[in-house]
Image: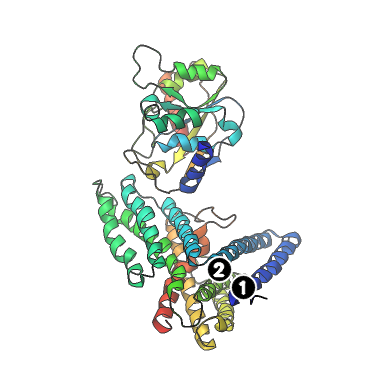
Amino acid sequence: MIGPLLIGATRFLVGGQGVWVGTAPSERQRIYFANHSSHLDTVILWAAMPPHLRRRTRPVAAADYWGKGRVQRHIALGVLNAVLIARQARGSDPLEPLKAALAAGDSLIFFPEGTRAAEPLPGPFKPGLYHLAKAFPQVELVPVFLDNLRRALPKGSLLPVPLSCVARFGAPIALGDGEAKPAFLARARDAVVALA
Amino acid sequence: MMAIPTMGWLIGGVVALLLVASTIGFILSRRITSESGRDTVRNLNARIKAWWVMVAVFALAFVFGKAVTLLLFAFVSFYALREFLSLTPTHPSDHRAIAAAFYIFLPLQYWLIWIDWLSMLTILIPVYAFLLLPVLSLTKGVTGDYLSRIAKIQWGLMLAVFCISHAPALLILDLGGTPPIQLLFFLITVVQLSDVMQYVAGKLFGRTRIAPNVSPSKTVEGLVGGGLAATAVGAALWWITPFTPLQAAGMAAAIVVAGFLGGLVLSAVKRSLGAKDWGTMIEGHGGALDRLDSVTFAAPLFFHLVNYFFA
């Protein structure tokens, strides 16, 4: 019930259509990694997927935001089937829940910057994407650029305004043999920037 | 037997015309093989499809009255404004001004029409929104590109909400015996016919381009041929208006000229933004603003001419 409502409201306010530039929708196991500028990002990327892929594609969401209020929690867990991670984890591996989801065969929606950027282009990527790519070499890494969201619901605002947003999907990249962490993260970020 | 009101006949007539047009369009799409010919046919068929939508909107508006008419036009304004502001780069710090445009001024404008407050609906956006929006955009303290950012929001609100709302605002005019919805029908029919007749006449006889850098498809021959045809149809529709045939021709000519200039201006705006089409709301139509560019200029002019001389 909430799911279709969420999709309907998203389409009405911000469109949020998926534009598949470098790849087509596919059942293959994938990590979609995107720039992060708004709380709407998670919903938009999820809504941009064809319905049959949505069920197996789980957004990675910060537990300190999406796990907090009752509404956020219900949307995150009940509707989006999100994987919640603790951003300030001490001791344990914060990527553990993601690895579990990948091992179970799910695809992920992942924001490698870790936090929302105020600028149009994404900031530097955190190492999480590298570790996942290394642990799961068979999973395709698909760059996505989310356009206009920083205007529709900028950081610090509560009310989304109706501006058309799109999710642009680029050609998959893969971790090279022995490719160093900084080089790979820079290349991954460039792949997202190239879609801007 | 219930008497069929004039609007019923008008809508029935347009439906009959559209059936003919759709049939011709379908045959042409099968017959024409040259690449440029196919493009033209595709464009015509896309227009015909949009007119079916418009006729449906009109039928709904006519059957359900003013409230539904205003609601439908409010949605048109909403989509047009969304389209305009999406293509127009503003800054995240303009969020409050954009929210006010969508959530306060748009509904307020249509509410003023609903309660017949004529003097306020003509100044709400040009005065109050004009002054308030720059204040809201300033609250984040970002001054880079300030003037151009705020001008874009003001333009969007003026065109998509203020100008377009003058079409349904015709409904609040007291025209003696004429039901005002017939004037709305007159306006939309002349504007749309003028658009398509200019396009057809331009394709057939077009030689002299009027503004090659702004809108390469607009020609003198197209403007004159299409404009005269639309003016003639407008004159022939005098009986649904409070005008004499000559006055109806004059009104139609004013609509044609304003519509032409609106198309030209919006084309220039679009080009300065580096876009070809406004959006993808109606299939093959660019966007809502691609179909409504003429209305944005024609509606306020027609509204005030009618209000000044006939209401």
Q: In which chain is the residue bearing label 2?
A: B
**x 57%, y 58%: residue:** B285
**From where the camera sits, is residue A25 visible?**
no
**x 32%, y 52%: residue:** B97
Please provide percent x and percent y for residue B237. Answer: 57, 81
Query: What is the distance, in whole Å, between disc 1 and disc 2 at their CAs?
Result: 8 Å
In the picture as drawn, the residue positioned furthest to the front comes out as B1
Q: In which image quadrant can residue A54 be found?
A: top right
Q: Which of marks 1 and 2 is nearer the N terminus?
A: 1
Which image quarter holds the N terminus of chain B? bottom right
Does label 2 lie on the same chain as label 1? yes
**x 51%, y 67%: residue:** B65
Q: In which image quadrant can residue B166 be found?
A: bottom left
| Badge 1 density bin: few <14, some 14–19, many ≥20, Cα 10 Å | few
Numbered mark located on residue B62 in the image: 2
The residue carrying mark 1 is B8
